[in-house]
Amino acid sequence: MKTDVQEINPTRKTIAVTVTSEEVSEQEAKLIKDFQRQAKIPGFRPGKAPEKMVRSRFAKDIQKELEQRVVSQAHQEGVAGADFTVFNIIKLDEGEISGGQEAVVTFTVDVVPEFEVPAYEGLKVTTTPTEATEADVAKMLDQILSQRAEYNVAEKAAEKGDYVQCGYEGKIGDDLVADLVPDTPMYGTQKSTWEEAGNENAPGVRAIIDGLVGMKAGDTKEVTMDFPEDFKPEALAGKTAVYSLEAKEVREKVMPEMDEAFFESLKVKDEAELRERISENIENQKKQQNANAERQQITEALINAVDFPVPESGVEAETETVLRDFMQRNMQQGVSADEFEKHKDSLHEGASKAGHDRLKSRFILSKIAEKEKITVENDDFSRMIMMEAQQSGENPEKLVKELRKDQNRINKMRREIILGKTMDLLVEKA
């Protein structure tokens, strides 16, 4: 058996394995004997049927099994025995495999790149204070109260925080905005919708949200919206639109009383305990944000510290994952499929960059893990299984049974644990 390796590019190679006619014949002879032992042919005891009859009766099965055995043998010799690490088999060309004839099996593979591990101890990261300020607590308390607020019909001008039923129509010159962006009606025409007056975080047309402040039911006015140069949808970018706005009903925001029933519903004793609970939650959130930021900064530092090509097939797989996750998140927020289609090129370009960087960081972390001799313990598996069970709502014991049947899933879990432990180590050393 002879192996010939050719480089297509720095991360892709072909491995051509030549299996001699004698080796193919040897595999075929073993195969015939196996079929003879197992074949049930009327008139013959097991193992006694003539070879010619077995060949004739099971020709298709014998050929299929021969191809599988020769390819497996070639894989063991050429792929598993290579002096480089195969990342992924891209293509298999097995040519013609027949008894008594030489066979050439060609594997096109992506390989794990070779590179020097960059310095990873003492990487600099920046964090923000985690203390919950009085302003933080007051803002969160206001959000809690707002979630339980009532909105009563009011014969008054809308104040910031009140909800207003309104209708509006936008024009840019003589053109209706609704005709320019038919897939996003919030920027064009709305016959009847509810908006929170003055809400700084509200989606939609900023001029309308702000313009509702001071309007009473039955009032009309015109407001002007200057869309930024980088605005999305692009059809409105840099344009100035005039909106005819009508207020139909005002509902006053009435905050709940912070009384005994209110505190009981939140499972706290009084306002002091509520503020303390809010403060703890804010501090925990800030700590988590810092932890995420540290990992992101370390990842970026590692990616920028060393340059090497990454396998195309890996980038493609990571790109698809990034795109799928992005689309799922945005579809849950109401973004239409047409909107994705309009921006598919820029979306794919961004996802490809993110996929490339994600794969590159995984290679670097894996090498650091090897250098630091990071291993996976039973406790690591137990913790990850409990986390997955909590996230999916699945019974942990059932999850363990499923894992025992799926070695690929176990291997993937093992890789994720190692990468996670490696990042934890880098954070400690940062």
Image (cartoon, helix red, strand yellow):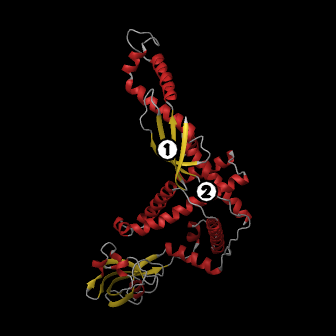
User: Can you identify the residue that label 1 sits on?
Assistant: 107
Q: Earlier in the sequence, mark 1 or mark 2?
A: 1
Q: Residue at x 44, y 27 (%)?
A: 99
Which quadrant of the structure image shows residue 213?
bottom left
**Where residue 30 appears, x then y in whole percent?**
51, 22
* Label 2 neighbour load within 10 Å: few <14, some 14-19, many 20+: many
Q: Marks 1 and 2, how far apart in space?
A: 23 Å
**Where residue 17 appears, x then y in whole percent?**
52, 39
Q: Residue at x 71, y 59 (%)?
A: 425
User: Can you identify the residue that label 2 sits on?
Assistant: 363
- Which residue occupies the foreground of this view, 384 or 172? 172
- Secondary structure beneath dot 2 equals helix
Q: Check residue 371 in the rendering and tell me which mark sits there, or answer none.
A: none
Amino acid on which disc 2 is placed: Phe
**Where residue 5 appears, x then y in whole percent?**
54, 46
Regarding residue 46, the answer to whether it shows in the image is: yes
- Which residue occupies the foreground of this view, 299 or 174? 299
**Where residue 305 appears, x then y in whole percent?**
65, 67
Q: Determine whether label 1 and label 2 are within 8 Å by CB.
A: no
Q: Residue at x 70, y 71 (%)?
A: 124
- Secondary structure beneath dot 1 equals strand
Amino acid on which disc 1 is placed: Phe
Which quadrant of the structure image shows residue 211?
bottom left
Horizontal arrangement in the rendering, residue 110 relative to residue 154 (left or right)? right
- Which residue occupies the foreground of this view, 44 or 422? 44
* Label 1 neighbour load within 10 Å: few <14, some 14-19, many 20+: many
Q: Residue at x 61, y 56 (%)?
A: 363
Regarding residue 421, the answer to whether it shows in the image is: no
Horizontal arrangement in the rendering, residue 131 relative to residue 103 (left or right)? right
**Quadrant of the rendering where the C terminus is positioned:** bottom right
Horizontal arrangement in the rendering, residue 296 relative to residue 156 (left or right)? right
